[in-house]
Image (cartoon, rainbow, N blue to C red):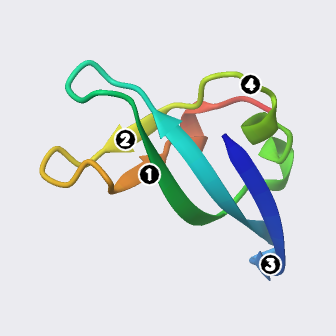
Amino acid sequence: MHMNQTGLFVNGQPVVDLQLQITNPVHASYVVARREAVPAAMMGWPMSGQPMPVRVDATKPENVAIAWETMRG
């Protein structure tokens, strides 16, 4: 996992470039790059080494969405 701040903000939330390693029971482990607005309370989470919940598109596994709403800062 890798994270770079872009210097951009959306609704007061920092926008970062993320490189995520996705592991799920359907596909072999793979890496996805995303640009995402990260809730300020969660800024440390991507680099903490803790797993992050994501939703994976069943037809296009490269399309993932981080489930920020399920996480607690």
Rendered-image quadrant of the N terminus: top right
Residue 49 lies, in percent from the top left, at 74, 25
Q: Residue at x 86, y 40 (%)?
A: 44
Mark 2–mark 3 CB contact (< 8 Å): no
What kind of element bears circle 2? strand
What kind of element bears circle 4? loop
**Label 4 sits on residue:** 49
Q: In the drawing, what numbered circle is on residue 65?
A: 1
Amino acid at the residue labelled 1: Ala
What kind of element bears circle 1? strand
Mark 2–mark 4 CB contact (< 8 Å): no
Q: Residue at x 52, y 37 (%)?
A: 21
> Quarter-wise, where is residue 47 in the image?
top right
Residue 23 lies, in percent from the top left, at 41, 26
Amino acid at the residue labelled 3: Phe
Mark 1–mark 2 CB contact (< 8 Å): yes
Residue 43 lies, in percent from the top left, at 83, 47
Relative side of 68 to 49, left or right: left
Judged by depth in the image, the label closer to the viewer, 3 or 4, is 4
> Quarter-wise, where is residue 20 in the image?
top right
**Label 3 sits on residue:** 9
**Label 2 sits on residue:** 55
Q: Earlier in the sequence, mark 4 or mark 1?
A: 4
Spatial separation of the CA atoms under disc 2 and disc 3: 23 Å
